[in-house]
Image (cartoon, coloured by chain):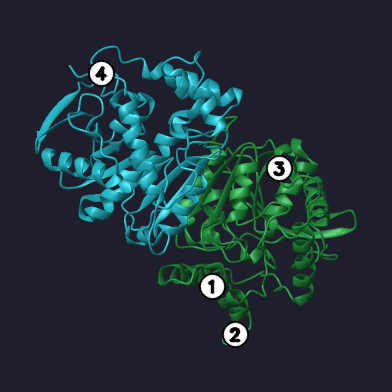
Chain colours: A cyan, B green
Amino acid sequence: MTTKASNITAPTQFIAVKGERYAYRRFGAGPGLPLLCLQHFTGTLDNWDPAVTDPLAAGREVILFESAGVGRSSGVVPETIAGMTAHALAFLDGLGLKVCDVLGFSLGGMVAQQMVQDRPSVFRRMILVGTAPRGGEDIMHLEKPVLAKHLADPTLKGYKVLQKIFFAPTQTSQAAGAAFIERLMQRKQDREPVSGPEIAQAQMAAFREWDRFSAERFADLRNIKQPTLVVNGVHDEMIAVRNSYWLSENLPNAVLLTYPDSGHGSLFQFPESFTRQATAFLASGASSAAY
Amino acid sequence: MTTKASNITAPTQFIAVKGERYAYRRFGAGPGLPLLCLQHFTGTLDNWDPAVTDPLAAGREVILFESAGVGRSSGVVPETIAGMTAHALAFLDGLGLKVCDVLGFSLGGMVAQQMVQDRPSVFRRMILVGTAPRGGEDIMHLEKPVLAKHLADPTLKGYKVLQKIFFAPTQTSQAAGAAFIERLMQRKQDREPVSGPEIAQAQMAAFREWDRFSAERFADLRNIKQPTLVVNGVHDEMIAVRNSYWLSENLPNAVLLTYPDSGHGSLFQFPESFTRQATAFLASGASSAAY
């Protein structure tokens, strides 16, 4: 008897590499390469929406990675994207994974960009959602009134704040946000501990370091040869959509897809569309990112 | 015996409406609504790439429209988008078409935007490629050196100039441009006369009028409720890609898709991808543009 591969039920696993113990989940099967999924600011394995992971797991192994210092992974949260990248690469080494695709969301999209630059031979195709290039702008400024008002609202408990800040302030987007939160709560057992302020502070330091660039802005993106799919909601207040424009204009081989009526969590607002598009993109063996 | 529906072989037809005689081609069949296709600056019916029209015609009627004063259509080229819109609406009235989808490329995309505002009930879904909203910027400034050098080059005969200005200056994009030109030449008979300078001048006046806006910039886009797919090449020198960003950010219900390594003619550079995406978009009956 087999159970449907799902982030609702996939057991959390652990792997020891170079003195750390990383938590992860690995589920699904199919003809595709394994898809490494890199998570957002303060997100744990439990923040991956099953409506996104599970359709992708129908065609490949999905590997959700918990970076150092987050959830039940050991260690300290690095204060740079480079530090997080080193952990993610150590994790791949631990798994013995020689080639894969990668999906990075928000903070995870920055780690994905750094990974493909540090180890280009490992990665075939890349999906970057709600993220920014090094040297981007309007990246995770939680002090912005439009975000701060929700973060400071004592009536918003637990995931309710995610519904506010990941989705646009329209009825339709907020309803999609409520459905997203319900899906995150479908996993009842073997959940990760929720991230505290120390994790947030270290990751925020990494965002601020990622703001800085030297020499020619965005020139580093030209070295990324992987076909890339860039995705964003047009009303993203957490990482402004113009960062996705810069990614698609400066990566040599990137298709951009933006969604209406949506913010940072566009992939969770339109999981059917997103997984259909991502599946088509990942299924392509073309040299061009166009799919 | 049936012949494959194709812009290579579809006969040019004529319809008389309100004192004008419009040239058009109508071919294809299938479950989809008819797709009205509106053409670019100086383009005739012969400028529709069969690699784009024919796959679309496999699922619906494709209707290519020649506006007044272009090709073998009678009349005078209007110097405003509103004037061209009136001709296109008269044409639809002449056909007795009560509901359809619309694909507007470049100049045609501006006419499409005006049509859906003037007659919202006729149009179900809209595809806008390489175009701009009223009040956009960097729209068809052929005096820009990057364009002018090709337009003034005496060695570029006929469609060869299109290859230069519709495609990016890379080997891959130029090769795609050469293939596009070959496809345009596959139609051997019943071709339209090539547009002369009077047509160009009148259409250019319409671009300059479209630059202007009153009151709040892009506010008119909020009245367009049709699910819309916006498409552009990221290196479009004829109508800068930021115009597509403005469209997708200000239309209430638009998905944006941009292509790498491509310019104004991105749909002709990636016809397999474009027609696959357009077909999926048009096949959707969802209220959201996400597909």
Q: Based on the displayed image, in which of its 4 quarters is residue A170 positioned?
A: top right
Q: Position of residue B159 (x, y in %)?
A: 59, 75
Residue at 57% over, 40% down: B282
In this view, A98 is above or below B49: above
Residue A279, can we see it?
A: no
Residue bearing mark 1: B163
Q: Are marks 2 and 1 in contact (CB under 8 Å)?
A: no
Three-letter code, disc 3: Leu
Q: Based on the displayed image, in which of its 4 quarters is residue B226 positioned?
A: top right
In this view, A102 is above or below B80: above
Numbered circle sitting on residue B234: none
Residue at 35% over, 15% down: A186
In this view, A137 is above or below B41: above
Task: Give the CA separation, mark 4 to mark 2.
Answer: 65 Å
Is disc 4 in the same subunit as disc 2? Answer: no
Q: Secondary structure at mark 1?
A: helix
Numbered circle sitting on residue B153: 2
Three-letter code, disc 2: Asp
Q: Secondary structure at mark 2?
A: loop
- Name the residue at the right extreme: B19
- For marks 2 and 1, the one nearer the N-term is 2
In the visual, does A213 lie left or right of B87?
left
Q: Are marks 4 and 1 in contact (CB under 8 Å)?
A: no
In the visual, does B282 lie left or right of B272?
right
Residue bearing mark 4: A9
Q: Chain of mark 2?
A: B
Three-letter code, disc 1: Gln
Q: Position of residue B118 (x, y in %)?
A: 80, 43
- Crowd rating for badge 1 (residues with CA inside 10 Å; few <14, some 14–19, many 20+): many
* Viewer-nearest of discs 2 and 1: 2
Q: Chain of mark 3?
A: B
